[in-house]
Amino acid sequence: MKYSGFAYINTIGCQMNVYDSEKLASILKSYGFEKTNDMDTADIVVCNTCSIRHKAEEKAFSFLGRFAKIKKKKPHLITVMAGCVAQQEGKKAFERIPHLDLVLGTQAFSRFGQHIDSIKSGQQRIVDTKDSQMIYETMPDTACFDENKVSRFVTIMQGCENFCTYCVVPYVRGQERSRLPQSIVEEITVLANSGVKEVTLLGQNVNSYGQKEGQISFPQLLTKINEINGIHRIRFATSHPKDLSSDLMYAIRDLDKVCNHLHLPVQSGSNHILKKMNRGYTRELYIKQILELKKQCPDIALSTDIIVGFPSETKEDFNDTVDLLQKIEFDSIFAFAYSDRSSAPAAKFPNQIDEKEKSDRLNKLLKQQEHYTEKKNKDQVGKILKVLVEGKSAKKRNGFDQYNKTIEQMVGRTESNKIVHFPIEHVNIGEIIKIQIESAYSHSLWGHPVGTGA
């Protein structure tokens, strides 16, 4: 049975959720639903959730909670909680959202369609959080893509078995499992044929891709993707430091489409805290890897994740993290104050840190990083960089043209993942152009086009 109507999908959280939401949209399209950006016109509302931090979890409950009154006016409206919070909460989600129709776990996407059938037939409060050893494999439906999308996410593996003590991923996404390389190559080929120029490969630990199944290694997968016509740039996230291999460093160095940028989460600069986090490496090993990486790829841009205020983190532990920033000088960081997740072991650790102390440490760390980010950006002034044009910028540059009009601008990214704004010219979205950098700011660059760069 097919159903017509409008579907509204709200994506909360990580890059992997963006990819998963596209899969859900594709399923809904096959059931006759048309994607809408207007919640008021929707016949089905899906909230694809993230539980990595408490704030994201509460945001999901808040979003779905607002449909209680709407469902009284539109009894046919179907409300769905999908993703990590759904997997974590199961039937308990109905206690907070009584009007919810479906709780769809992270490994139940292949059964989404049949649950829609059941709800249309009158079944209520369906919960599907069954574990699955299979990855839901479908080719992308390019009709579901946002207009002018030149960059896409592609999941190459799911789950995790590292069991970092602060993380819920192993509990909500299951055991680590890798997709078949030929399926990944086929999907990216479809994307390339639809006009996509850049792909970002996703996994909790892409460095361990294929190891469990005895498949090709991650660097070998990159080599295969590098050969796909139409794709100009390849990115990936996330890499685990304990599994960073020399072969991956060589792949970044030698494969022309693999971007000269690595996101390598360190989480803490303290060996004491790294051990309590169960990260499997020391600060010394991390620094050694970075030095070797810079030797192989001298101009590589580096970013990382850091958690401050982890249980029992002393001021000395925190100072070790600040010291690590000074030694490495990352291009950018994503830093967060530690947040308890009920199913993660660290929630039961003693010596929890005061919230104000967490906030103070976070602010100090971010202020320290600002110096390095601005320094790295200012180093780009005067250089000519290749930029992949992503579209019109939401910002307008302070200043006026010869007609006394505010300067409108476009935006793109360099290979090293730096955002570049430039005045609107005769360029196409998806084009790679050369831009001479004239100004540097805290989180972006400004310049003028000087030619094509492909």
Image (cartoon, rainbow, N blue to C red):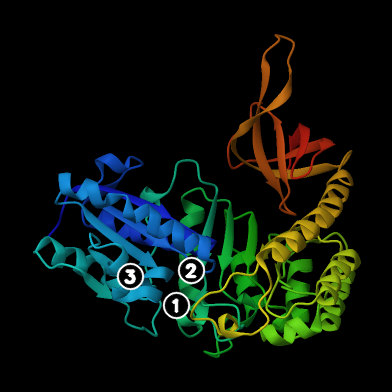
**Earlier residue among tags 1 and 3:** 3
Q: Which residue is mark 2?
A: 51
What residue is rendered at 85% in x and 59% in y?
299
**Mark 1–mark 2 CB contact (< 8 Å):** yes
Q: Is residue 83 visible?
A: yes
Q: Position of residue 173 (x, y in %)?
A: 45, 77
| Secondary element at tag 1 | helix
Q: Is residue 228 above or below residue 241?
A: above
* Residue beneath the point at 16% across and 48% down: 72
Residue farthest toward the top in the current orientation of the protein: 403
Residue hosting label 3: 109
Q: Residue at x 64, y 33 (%)?
A: 410
Query: Which disc is residue 172 wearing?
Result: 1
What's the residue type where badge 3 is placed?
Phe
- Give the spatial CA distance, label 1 vs label 2: 9 Å
Q: Residues within 10 Å of mark 1 (few under 14, many from 20)?
A: many
Quarter holding the N terminus is bottom left
Report the residue at 71% width, 53% height from top.
Answer: 417
For the C terminus, the quadrant is top right
Kind of residue sitting beneath label 1: Val
The disc, 1 or 2, on the residue closer to the chain's N-terminal end is: 2
- Residue 99, how many percent across, how many down? 23, 59
Camera-nearest label, 1 or 2: 2
Please state which amino acid type lies under the numbered disc 2: Ser
Q: Quadrant of residue 211?
A: bottom right
Query: In terms of secondary structure, where does tag 3 sit?
Result: helix
